[in-house]
Image (cartoon, rainbow, N blue to C red):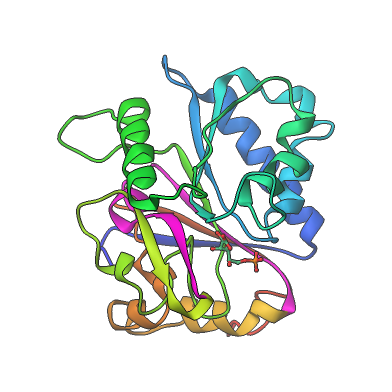
Amino acid sequence: MSPMLLVTRKILPETNQLCNTMAQEIQSLVREHRGAKPFSIALAGGSTPKRLYETLARPPFLQRIPWEKVAFYFGDERSVPPEHPDSNYHMAKEAMFDRLPSVQVYRMEAEAEDLDASAASYEGLLREQLTRDEERAPVFDLILLGIGNDGHTASLFPGTSALEETQKLVVANDVPQLQTKRMSLTYPLLNAAQRVWILVTGINKRQIVADCLQSQTPEEDRTKWPVLGVQPTSGNLIWWLDRDAASNLSP
Ligand code: 6PG
């Protein structure tokens, strides 16, 4: 783990309190954001973040966040069309985009026949939109992630080739345990972000949360639990947990 990495844990009793606190923080970050480019957020998929997206898309955040200053991207996507119920874009659209005033959304086209080409195209978009210094990877203002019970994050699953990627920022990742391919951001891009937030809720995730946050050997354990490879060089990593997800953490 990078020497400067400060892993912060923010634990709130109930999921709705957690989502409101996160939404409040996003509101502050967007309102304070300066610069010609929008505040860039890479969204997590799966089911956990849906409550957060719904919170952002209803009062008071719906009115208080200057949505014209925000651009949404994705951390990963399943290889299905955007209207498919398994699509991360579909979830975010139903939970949030459809309720917001017009907002910039850059979808991963993971339904493409040639997923490698589509991943390269998305990387080109990110380099064009988010690059601050030609010498370095593009920088997201905020990347939201979740974790699976196997310790995967985005679509960086244990034992998959994307874990070894050091050059490409977006890849098509073969996930044999799911018998599918997925598009995913890779560690070089995740770890270039200004800030990374990992959102985990529910009693079912309490053991993987404890395993990861209490790992004494994160560099070894990152192959077993890929979320441990998320070590933003900015040093800004927050685990947002509700009481249930945090319930196996030792005091
Ligand atoms: C995805 C997500 C993935 C997710 C975890 C947790 O496409 O599935 O990006 O990384 O965060 O699988 O999913 P749940 O929130 O549904 O438990």
- Is residue 170 found inside the magenta-colored segment of the image? no
The answer to which image quadrant residue 199 occupies is: bottom right
Percent across and percent down for residue 80 are 58, 54
Q: Nearer the viewer, residue 235 or 188?
A: 188
Q: Ligand 1: which quarter?
A: bottom right
Residue 205 appears left or right of 94: left
Percent across and percent down for residue 95 are 76, 43
Q: Residue at x 70, y 80 (%)?
A: 204
The answer to which image quadrant residue 35 occupies is: top left
Residue segment shown in magenta: 179-203
- Up/down of 248 relative to 60, above or below: below
**Residue 193 appearing in the image:** no
- Up/down of 37 relative to 50, above or below: above
Counting labels gives 0
Given the current orientation, which residue lies at the most extreme front position? 113
Percent across and percent down for residue 124 are 31, 34
Q: Quadrant of the N terminus?
A: bottom left
- Is residue 188 found inside the magenta-colored segment of the image? yes
Q: Quadrant of the C terminus?
A: bottom right
Q: Residue at x 71, y 39 (%)?
A: 93
The answer to which image quadrant residue 246 occupies is: bottom right
Residue 43 appears left or right of 185: right
Q: Residue at x 37, y 46 (%)?
A: 119
Q: Nearer the viewer, residue 146 or 245?
A: 146
Percent across and percent down for residue 161 are 30, 70
Q: Residue at x 68, y 46 (%)?
A: 90
**Residue 140 appearing in the image:** yes
